[in-house]
Amino acid sequence: MLEGQELTDELFDYIIQAANGTETQNKIHGYKEISISKEGVTL
């Protein structure tokens, strides 16, 4: 299990990879839009 700074670093690396075009699970499964609000996630 990851903790603290290690988790922060891994999340940051994942975000950079996704921004650079690495396929995320949403892309693989065909989801094209997602919205996050205070009340939850809307697909």
Image (spheres, helix red, strand yellow):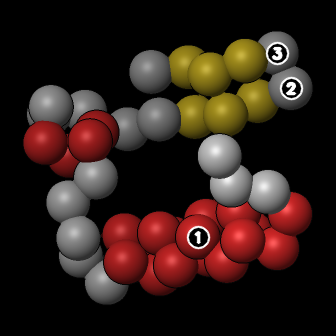
Residue 32 in view here = no
Q: Are marks 3 and 2 in contact (CB under 8 Å)?
A: yes
> Do labels 2 and 1 touch, CB within 8 Å?
no
* Near-viewer residue (31 or 15): 15
Sequence-wise first label, 1 or 3: 1
In the displayed structure image, the side of residue 19 where residue 9 appears, left or right: right
Residue 36 visible in image: yes
Where disc 3 sits, the SS reads loop
Residue 28: quarter of image: top left
Image location (x, y in percent) of residue 31: 25, 33
Q: Amino acid at mark 1?
A: Glu
- Mark 1 neighbour class, 10 Å CA radius: few under 14, some 14 to 19, many 20 or more: few
| Amino acid of disc 3 | Glu
Residue that sits furthest to the front in the current view: 1
Count how many numbered circles sit on residues in the image. 3
Would you name the residue on which mark 1 appears?
Answer: 10
Instruction: Looking at the picture, tell me which residue is in the foreground, 19 or 12.
Output: 12
- Going 20% across and 46% down the picture, which residue do you hit? 27
Residue under label 3, please give it.
Answer: 39
Query: Residue 1, relative to residue 2: is it above or below?
Result: above
User: Of tags 2 and 1, which is closer to the observer?
Assistant: 1
Provide residue 9's location: percent of width, then percent of height: 67, 77
Q: In this figure, which residue is indicated by the disc labeled 2?
A: 38
Amino acid type assigned to the residue bearing label 2 in the image: Lys
Q: Secondary structure at mark 1?
A: helix
Above or below, 8 relative to 1: below
Q: Which residue is located at x 82 percent, y 73 percent?
A: 5
